[in-house]
Amino acid sequence: MLETLVAFTGAAMLIAMAPGPSTIVIMRVAVRSGRRAGVAAVLGNEAGVVLWGVAAAVGLSALLVASRLVYDGLRIVGAVVLVWFGVRALWEARRRRGDEGAGGRGEGADVTVSSDAVGGGDSLWRCFRLGLITNVANPKAGVFAVSFLPQFVPVSVPTGWPVLVMLVGLTVVWALVDVVWYGAVLWLVGAARRVLGRAGVRRRLEQVSGVVLIGLGVRLAAETR
């Protein structure tokens, strides 16, 4: 059991380190609205992880594997969500440029705020929802949960440990590993906040994250199973 847990933790860490939509959204929220907002986005993302894990445990995620219609439906919804987030980021970058021009603020102007502030109109609840929606709207997360988690359930489950409990327990470990990794990401963003908080840099980051999110959305919409 201990060997299984160690192997699962290592695999979950490698998965967390792979960049994807959640990483982009969490970093954007942290740069835009501060550390607490980034933590809220992380918690939202992990709530999505837990939902997918529980769905896999009770067999609901298997529908994504068995039904092409269900998978494609969620895939299109996820693609629309990512493209919408990307468009919003590009619009925000354009608006910031207009504000800088109107206010006479130079390209290198420092607009750094407290790392614990929630600015830009982003409440903690909204940041939580951004993380949650990004994760839940990604059908790959569901397919991954139903194909990844069962591999680490021992063939001989210990007495008193039903498979359902094992899968939910592994899901919690998966979420905790994610929290550790994204915590490190937020720390790095916070350490670079003084640079990232400059108006010109923030605008470029909005543009880059917008383009990346739109690209991920288009790729998700165009891919075939």
Image (cartoon, grey):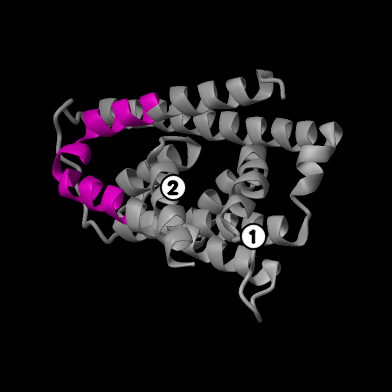
Q: Residue at x 62, y 36 (%)?
A: 81
Q: Quadrant of residue 18?
A: top left
Give the residue pinned by disc 2: 11
Q: Label 1 is placed on what type of residue?
A: Val
Q: Nearer the viewer, residue 220 or 163?
A: 163
Where residue 200 appears, x then y in whole percent?
A: 23, 28
Residue 16 on the magenta span: no
Q: Residues within 10 Å of mark 1 (few under 14, many from 20)?
A: few
Q: Residues within 10 Å of mark 2 (few under 14, many from 20)?
A: some
Q: Secondary structure at mark 2?
A: helix
Q: Which mark is residue 155?
A: 1
**Magenta region, main secondary structure:** helix
40 sits to left or right of 143: left
| Label total for image | 2
Residue 207 on the magenta span: yes
In the rendered image of this protein, does residue 54 appear above or below residue 7? below
**Residue stretch in magenta:** 183-208
Q: Is residue 126 visible?
A: no
